[in-house]
Image (cartoon, rainbow, N blue to C red):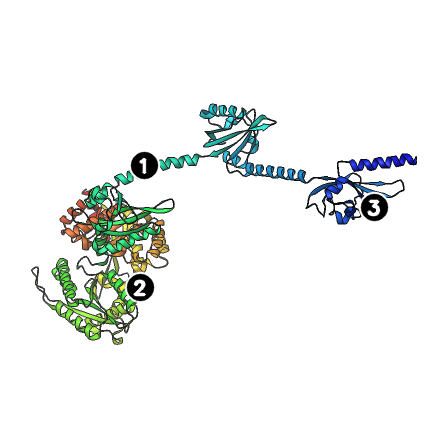
Amino acid sequence: MNHFSKFELEDFRTLIIQLPEPVCIFSSFNDRPDLLIYANEKCRELLQSSTKEIIGTSWENLCEAAVDAETDVTSLTEPDRLYKTTFKKRLNGRVCLLKMKEFTSASGARYFMMTISDETEHDRTKEDLRVSMSEFESLFKYNPHIVYMIDENGYFKNFNPAGLERLKYAYSELEGKFFLDVVTVHDRERTKDHFFEVLKGRVQHFQIQIQDKYNTLLTVEVTAVPIFVDGKVQGVIGTAQDITLRLETELKLTESEESHRAIFDHNVDPVITFDLEGNFITFNEATKMILGMSPEELKGESFLGFINEEVREETKHNFQQVLKGKPYQYETSTRNKEGEMVWLHITLIPAFLNDELSHIHCIGKDITLNKKHQAMMHQMAYHDSLTGLGNQQLFSRDLYRMLNETTDGEFSLCIIGLDRFKFINDYFGREAGDHILSIIAERLKKSAGDRGAVYRYGGDEFAILTANTTVQETRRLAEEAIANVRESFDDEGYETVLTASVGVSFYPRHGVNKKEIVRAADRAMYFAKKHGRNIVQLYSSNIEGLTESNVKMETLMRRALKNKEFIVYYQPQFKADTEEICGIEALLRWHNDELGWVSPATFIPLAEETGLIVPIGNWILEEACRQNVSWQKNGFPTVPISVNLSLRQFYQSDLCEMVESVILMTGIQPELLTLEITETIAMQEGIASGILNTLKQLGVKIAMDDFGTGYSSLQYLQSFSIDHVKIDKAFTDKLDTKEGRAIISTIIALGHNLGMKVVAEGVETAEQVQSLRQLGCDIFQGYYFSRPLPPMDLADISFQHQSSK
């Protein structure tokens, strides 16, 4: 028995020594592995240690804490349990698979036998496989193009999210669907051929059209690859890149290139390509026509030689700006082959080759006509049409400039009011009065010389602004002006003498802003008129306040409003082609027991100044609407009524509510109410635009009165929703002149181009009617057809006029 045991022990040892796997045995302590007491040759090779070095090593010093693949280990004694760990020494982190087995010897001693397998390469292989699968999954899942898999029978078995989104299908709708069902009919046969080629193991590239769930067509570029399993094709995996947009872009690019060629060759404006020094490379026919040069003469020449000398340096500087790599625009001028000035708006566009600036494209827009129009519009905006002097708009601009620029010294303002001019105007007639005003304007310009700027301040008043002056110098200028005005007028078959009263104020002693400076000069002028006229009066605090007559007038106006002394007269408007009544303007009149008939030119400015114009204007609006409704009820032809809005009334916070209230209260149809505004209203564009938009929402119409007499009506006309423009009588009176006809023609063309009706005011002669018809004016208003009339008289004349048609 002992011999047999010894034989078995030796055989067992031989067996362990010859095992191909590393094996070692640990002693036991407290039911856990303790000291390594045996290691076979394979184990020593794995641990790269000799028997002497390794025997006696403790479990804790040899191995890391062991953890199985599923749960933390609390005991290593569980039979046949597999643990994965690393050795602490000599193995450089290699991964080993440990299998522990506890056994008990015949003497009752407990041991742990551990078999070790090197799992490093296996783990690496598994990790590489995991990474590859992850990369494939990412490529499939996150690919922005359509990615699909088809089995060998042609049925979808997988689809990536981007493909599902592009085709607008749910995965369940596409899984198992025959792949040709998403291909357009005309591409199915060709696509099937490509599919069979892939099943033969050949990669295919082709372009087809497919359709999404809602039959929207997509052009795609397909790459189809065979799926091999054990050397046999088991299906197809492919990508389909949507190139619909690219094809559309290529088509548009082709069309764009053709359009570019057409624009270059047939453009009526110059189109040029310059080198970086500004020399001609290519150019179109329009360029040759303007410059009057042949291609041989232009090619290689610098453009600067063709630029007018006075703007040459500025143009050179502007051209150099595009060399910074960004487009640039500017204006310049040249002369055509006839020697005429040609203004061009230049757009320079940098062109790059391989990210380097290589040449400059130039588009030149001929703006000569625009320049002429601008000059004419500037003249109309800033100058009085009768005298050619600067108007109130130019006066205000220059006064603000002087207020901003004058830091030392003083400047003066003279306001010149003609004495008894209303009598002259009434006695000799308006035409003679206008002629006298023109002569006075020339006399004032002569008096001012280069010492000051002269303006027509309004009506029969003028203004002179003088910079860097003294009281003595300003007084001398004002006295010369009075003397020149006083010279007799004996032209055009009449002879008379006029005098003028001058009020003078100084900045900064009499005010530091426009309102104070103008107010002081205005008060001084009225004081001069009340104290003898034909004198110069410097402002002082002794003459402050409204004049006695103004105070009395204001008192009478307040009483007139209360006692209902104001009357509304109505002036009809007539269609130019049929002379049928197409509108009526409401005009305010005032008859006072003490003053008699008071001219609107006398009391309306004071009403504006005192604020009485607001309640008066509201009353006119209500009265005119009531009268219009009454006319309609009595069979009067249905025509709109026009009511003027004053500056103060327009900017009242409750204007829109007041208008809406009048519409509801009187029952007038909103489209039969036209509100007339003036250029002064349009000067505050932002506020005015909001008010006008609100008024338009009520359904009323808007007319621009006195069109052409001020800058704002021209500048902001497009910003406002205007239905009618009214040509001022000052222009109508000049229809017999070339300049007057040109101005009215321009206004009519401008109004029509903006979709507006044009009304001519002050039509008084058959010749004016004929000329305005030839120019295309839409509506006439003036004494030739009817003067302003009381309501009953207007009704009579209107019915007679309608029945005569």
- Answer left or right for 373 relative to 19: left
Residue, far left: 493
Q: Position of residue 304 (x, y in %)?
A: 24, 51
Q: Earlier in the sequence, mark 2 or mark 1?
A: 1
Location of residue 801 by image quarter? top left
Marks 3 and 1, Cα distance to the nearest angstrom? 93 Å
Dot 2 amino acid type: Gly
Q: Quadrant of the N terminus?
A: top right
- The residue beneath circle 2 is 611
Marks 3 and 2, Cα distance to the nearest angstrom? 115 Å
Badge number at residue 540: none
| Residue in the foreground of this view, choosing between 681 and 196 | 196
For the residue labelled by badge 3, is the local secondary structure a helix, a strand or a loop? strand
| Residue in the foreground of this view, choosing between 489 and 626 | 489
- The residue beneath circle 3 is 28
Dot 1 amino acid type: Glu
Tell us which disc is closer to us: 2 or 1. Answer: 1
For the residue labelled by badge 2, is the local secondary structure a helix, a strand or a loop? loop
| Residue in the foreground of this view, choosing between 723 and 315 | 315
Q: Position of residue 326 (x, y in %)?
A: 35, 50
Badge number at residue 258: 1
